[in-house]
Amino acid sequence: MLNDFNEQTVIVTGAASGIGLSQVREFIKHGANVVAVDQDGEGLGLLDQSIKTDKMILLTGDVRLEDTAKQAVDAAIRLGSKVDIVCNTAGVLDGYHNVQDTSVEDWNNIIDTNLTSQFLLIKTVLPVMLEQGHGVFVNMASIAGLVAGGGGIAYTASKHAIIGMTKQLDLDYAGQGIRANCIAPGAIQTPMNAADFADDGNMAKWVADQTPAKRWARPDEVADLTLFLASEHSDYIHGTVVPIDGGWTEK
């Protein structure tokens, strides 16, 4: 069903590991051109070794900077002459810190990395999509964008804001061929959550026990959902947030 990405061009941020890495692999597998963006140049190098294709451009850059967004869009135009899909996947955790334990510097870093980076790429690519008359955004939120407890104050605020931004983006431009939705993952076994598996892994076991599905998800499960939301099969899904959380938010 999802072999309809041939000749489409995708930008994926946070592409060197975790969900972003799985998204890159799945889009390449289904025929897309992909611009893979991450500040981890070494991780992108490993990606280059594992995926041998002329349909991918690797871009090492800080997603918090407007220049990185411009470079990503320019690379997509060089690669495929257009930008069909943007996966705003890059993000960082905040150590579950409350307000008193969150410095202004830490707050700004979390907001800039998780939220402002998405805004910058959206703002940069949107004129291209409007000229094309079509475009899809799949923004990475979190269960922390729906309920408290999925992160600290900064992370939770950033993920709630992503959901609001996505809804407004879609409302503003749906009539011009633009779709925007976001994904809200729960417990996904990625390098970002490696601390939960450290030592005896008791935190990871507790999270699995508290999840109705009784397990952590794999990054490729989120990538599969991404491809569906990016495809024509979900053309009537607009401005929504789709949880993939093993039932966490049903409690």
Image (cartoon, rainbow, N blue to C red):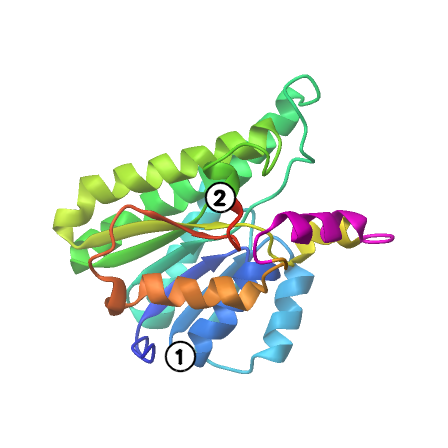
- The spot of residue 220 in percent (x, y) is 53, 68
Label tally: 2
Q: Is residue 3 magenta?
A: no
Residue 145 in the image: state x and y as whole percent.
47, 38
* Residue at x 54%, y 32% (from the top left corner): 148
Magenta span of residues = 198-213
Q: Position of residue 41 (x, y in %)?
A: 64, 60
Outermost residue to the right: 199
- Is residue 74 shown above or below 180? below
Most distant residue in the top direction: 100
Foreground: disc 1 or disc 2: 2
Residue name at image x 65 percent, y 58 percent: 190
In which quadrant is the N terminus drawn? Answer: bottom left
- Whichever of labels 1 and 2 marks the residue nearer the N terminus, that label is 1
Instruction: Residue 213: give x, y in percent of width and height.
Output: 57, 58
Front residue (pair 89, 105) = 89
Image quadrant where residue 225 sits: bottom left
Look at the picture and state if 54 lies above or below 239. Answer: below
At a point 51% along the width and 42% down the height, the residue shown is 251
Disc 2 residue type? Answer: Thr
For disc 2, the marked residue is 249
Q: Nearer the viewer, residue 146 or 232?
A: 146
Camera sees residue 63: no
**Residue of label 1:** 30
Q: Is residue 208 magenta?
A: yes
Q: Secondary structure at mark 1?
A: loop
At label 1, the amino acid type is His
Q: Is residue 89 left or right of residue 217?
A: left
Q: Secondary structure under badge 2?
A: helix
Q: Is residue 114 visible?
A: yes
Q: Which mark is residue 97?
A: none
